[in-house]
Image (cartoon, helix red, strand yellow):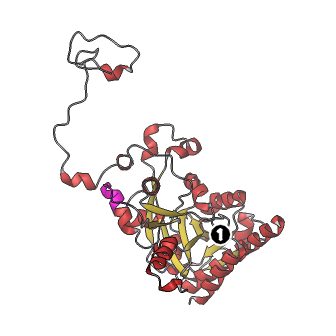
């Protein structure tokens, strides 16, 4: 008996396999956050590594944020709009890396809770002329337990302070890497992100071993 | 159930109903919104709407499953329905898997609005939202990202 030749049988299998009718399986998205003050090179960083030119999405301070940032007046909550740049890197058919650039000031922290959910880690971009711009982001990622790396953007190879001095100013833990990179160059951004991923891998392995 | 005609000057007062439901021209104050006798100009209908108009007034209640990077595709089994222009535009983008953030950026819709509308379209069976089984990335996935990043020049 040959079921394959039976037309009825064929219809039957097609119906069972109707899940295969769907468009191709959606890739698994992973994300890395790039945080820093205005003008430190977040968008340049995202643009250097992204395969598309960075897209911008706007987010509004919603009612959920009122308690945190308490604007006092209800009318203000609809007027605070921030722009976020992000890029994409397709690792393979089933895996996509998203890189989200977010302002590093504490008044934007209301959206970080959403942003870090499921994130691999973060690159905090620092301009040595305005180191304190990144303090809120460092504080937040430390408290959230998100692996992060401090990346000093060396505009034109210039740094006002050495990496040791930056580390001293930030007072980050010993195991938090502080490195220099150039946001304009893909290879440099890639290497910085690889350090973030190393941190993420360490954490994921630690978590897995404590679970099992 | 019948309701008194508010134009009838003799209709009885019903204090149990929220006052504004009864406030006709005869009620205290006498204020009533101007009756809109014309539609807004066509140009204003598609652009310039304040975000909460598009979401029917909602600013909250976003599905926590729907993150910025969450992948969305058209549900191939979806039946034809009438959708708002924004919703049609979203469905139009989702032939290939696309992230919520990309939808927001390409349609210039606020992220919060996009999330609410994607949630609505998911509830209506128009879109598949691909929720990840485990939210925290596993070492194997991270290794794949590392290998992929190393491969780029």
The quarter of the displayed image where residue A193 is located? bottom right
Q: Is residue A68 above or below residue A97?
A: above
Where disc 1 sits, the SS reads: loop
- Of residues B50 and A14, the one drawn nearer to the viewer in this rendering: A14
- Of residues A139 and A154, the one drawn nearer to the viewer in this rendering: A139
Near mark 1 (Cα within 10 A), the count class, few <14, some 14-19 or many ≥20, is many
Q: How many marks?
A: 1
Taking the image as shown, residue B26 lies to the left or right of residue B70, namely left
Give the magenta part as a residue range: B79-88
Q: Chain of mark 1?
A: A
Which residue lies at the image location 44% right of the left edge and 65% below the top edge? B75
The reply to whether residue A5 is in sight is yes
Which residue lies at the image location 59% right of the left edge and 83% below the top edge? A188
Taking the image as shown, residue A122 lies to the left or right of residue A18, namely right
Q: Is residue B18 above or below residue B96?
A: above
Q: Position of residue B116 (x, y in %)?
A: 45, 52
Which residue is label 1 attached to? A120
Q: Is residue A79 above or below residue A119?
A: above
Which residue lies at the image location 33% right of the left edge and 23% below the top edge? B21
Farthest residue toward the left? B38
The reply to whether residue A174 is in sight is no
Q: Position of residue A49 (x, y in %)?
A: 53, 80
Taking the image as shown, residue A124 lies to the left or right of residue B61, namely right
In the rendered structure, does residue B22 fall within the stretch colored magenta?
no
In the rendered structure, does residue B87 fall within the stretch colored magenta?
yes
Q: Position of residue B74 (x, y in %)?
A: 42, 66
């Amino acid at each position: 008996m040959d079921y394959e030749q039976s037309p009825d049988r064929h219809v039957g299998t097609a119906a069972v396999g109707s899940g295969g009718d769907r468009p191709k399986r959606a890739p698994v998205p992973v994300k890395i956050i790039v945080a820093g003050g205005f003008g430190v090179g977040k968008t340049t960083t995202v643009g250097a590594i992204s395969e598309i030119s960075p897209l911008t999405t706007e987010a509004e301070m919603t009612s959920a944020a009122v308690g945190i940032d308490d604007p006092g007046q209800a009318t203000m909550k609809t007027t605070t709009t921030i722009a976020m740049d992000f890029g994409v890197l397709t690792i393979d058919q089933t895996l996509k890396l998203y890189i989200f650039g977010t302002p590093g000031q504490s008044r934007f922290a209301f959206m970080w809770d959403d942003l870090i959910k499921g994130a691999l880690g973060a690159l905090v971009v620092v301009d040595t002329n305005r180191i304190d711009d990144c303090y809120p982001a460092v504080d937040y990622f430390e408290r959230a337990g998100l692996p992060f790396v401090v990346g000093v953007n060396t505009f034109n190879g210039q740094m006002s302070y050495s990496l040791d001095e930056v580390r001293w100013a930030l007072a980050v833990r010993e195991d938090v890497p502080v490195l220099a990179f150039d946001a304009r160059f893909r290879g440099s951004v890639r290497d910085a992100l690889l350090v973030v991923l190393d941190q993420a891998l360490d954490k994921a392995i630690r978590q897995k071993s404590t679970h099992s | 159930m019948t309701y008194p005609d508010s134009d009838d000057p003799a209709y009885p007062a019903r204090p149990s109903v929220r006052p504004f439901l009864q406030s006709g021209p005869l009620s205290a104050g006498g204020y009533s919104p101007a009756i809109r006798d014309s539609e807004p100009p066509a140009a204003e209908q598609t652009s310039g709407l304040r975000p909460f108009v598009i979401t029917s007034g909602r600013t909250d209640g976003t599905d926590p499953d729907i993150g910025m990077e969450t992948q969305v595709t058209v549900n191939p089994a979806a039946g034809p329905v009438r959708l708002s222009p924004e919703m049609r535009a979203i469905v139009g983008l989702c032939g290939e898997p696309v992230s919520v953030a990309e939808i927001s950026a390409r349609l210039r819709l606020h992220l919060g609005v996009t999330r609410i509308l994607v949630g609505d379209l998911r509830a209506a069976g128009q879109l598949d939202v691909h929720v990840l089984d485990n939210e925290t990335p596993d070492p194997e996935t991270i290794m794949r990202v590392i290998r992929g990043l190393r491969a780029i020049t």
